[in-house]
Image: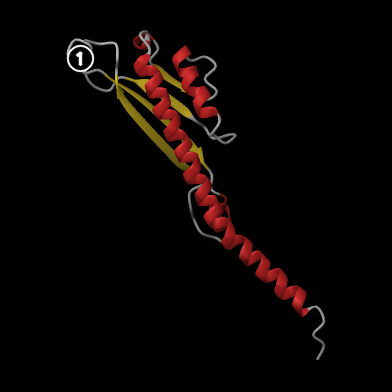
C-alpha cells in the first residue's frame, strides 16, 4: 500500500478546520468591538448634544455619512465613522424622549443602529443552515440636557 500524499491531505483538512475554529471567536470579538465603538459614539454624541444650546433645532435622524443632517448629527457621525464597517447601514437618531425644559427634566437620547454581517453566518449558510444575513447592533445613550433651569 502506498501512503504518499497522505500527510498533505490530513494537513489540509486539519488546517481548514483549525482556521474555522480560530475565526469564530475572532468574528464575534469583532462584532463585540464594533458594538462597543457604537456605544461610545452614542455616549459622546449624547454628551455633545446635552451641552449644545441649539440642540432643540437639530433633532432628527440621518443615515451615514450624514451629509445632509444637522451640525449636531454630523458631529455624532464623526465619532461613529471610526468604528463602522463599510456598507454597515448605520443610522443615527437624536431626539428628546421625555421631559421638558419647563420642568427641568429634559433628556437627550442618541440612538445608533448599524448592521453587522458575521462571516461565521456565511459559513453556516454554506453548510445548509438557515441563519439571518445581518445582526443589527443598536446602541442608545441618554443624558440630561444642560441648558435648562
Q: Nearer the viewer, residue 25 or 2?
A: 25
The image quadrant of residue 36 is top left
Under circle 1, the secondary element is loop
| Above/below status of 139 relative to 14 | above
Image quarter in which the N terminus is found: bottom right
Q: Which residue is found at the position 29% from the left and 15% from the top?
A: 146
Residue 33, how many percent across, how many down?
A: 49, 43
Image x and y of residue 138, in percent: 40, 36
Is residue 26 placed above or below 90 in the rendered structure?
below
Along the viewing direction, whichever of 12 and 36 lies nearer the viewer: 36
Residue appearing at x 57%, y 36% in the figure: 85
Relative to 138, does residue 2 appear above or below in the rendering? below
Residue occupying the far left of the picture: 103
Residue 83 in view here: yes
Q: Is residue 70 visible?
A: no
- The residue lying toward the viewer, choosing from 149 and 88, is 149
Residue at 60% x, 61% y: name it. Answer: 20
Q: Position of residue 86 (x, y in %)?
A: 60, 34
Q: How is the image coloured?
A: secondary structure
Give the residue at the far bottom of this rendering.
1
The image quarter containing residue 84 is: top right
Q: Residue at x 52, y 56 (%)?
A: 25
Left or right: 62 in relation to 98 = right
Q: How many marks?
A: 1
Q: Is residue 7 left or right of residue 122?
A: right
- How crowded is the residue under tag 1: few (<14 C-alpha within 10 Å), some, or many (20+)? some
The residue that label 1 is drawn on is: 104
Quadrant of the drawing holding the C terminus = top left
Q: Position of residue 67 (x, y in %)?
A: 55, 16
Amino acid at each position: 500500500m502506498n501512503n504518499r500524499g497522505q500527510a498533505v491531505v490530513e494537513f489540509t483538512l486539519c488546517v481548514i478546520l483549525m482556521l474555522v475554529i480560530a475565526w469564530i471567536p475572532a468574528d464575534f470579538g469583532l462584532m463585540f468591538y464594533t458594538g462597543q465603538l457604537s456605544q461610545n459614539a452614542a455616549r459622546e454624541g449624547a454628551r455633545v448634544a446635552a451641552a449644545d444650546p441649539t440642540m432643540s433645532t437639530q433633532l432628527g435622524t440621518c443615515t451615514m455619512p450624514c451629509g445632509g443632517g444637522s451640525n449636531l448629527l454630523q458631529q455624532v457621525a464623526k465619532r461613529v465613522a471610526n468604528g463602522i464597517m463599510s456598507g454597515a447601514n448605520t443610522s443615527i437618531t437624536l431626539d428628546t424622549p421625555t421631559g421638558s425644559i419647563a420642568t427641568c427634566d429634559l433628556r437627550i437620547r442618541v440612538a445608533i443602529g448599524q448592521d453587522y454581517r458575521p462571516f461565521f453566518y456565511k459559513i453556516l449558510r454554506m453548510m445548509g443552515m438557515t441563519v439571518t444575513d445581518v445582526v443589527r447592533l443598536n446602541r442608545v445613550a441618554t443624558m440630561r440636557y444642560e441648558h435648562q433651569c
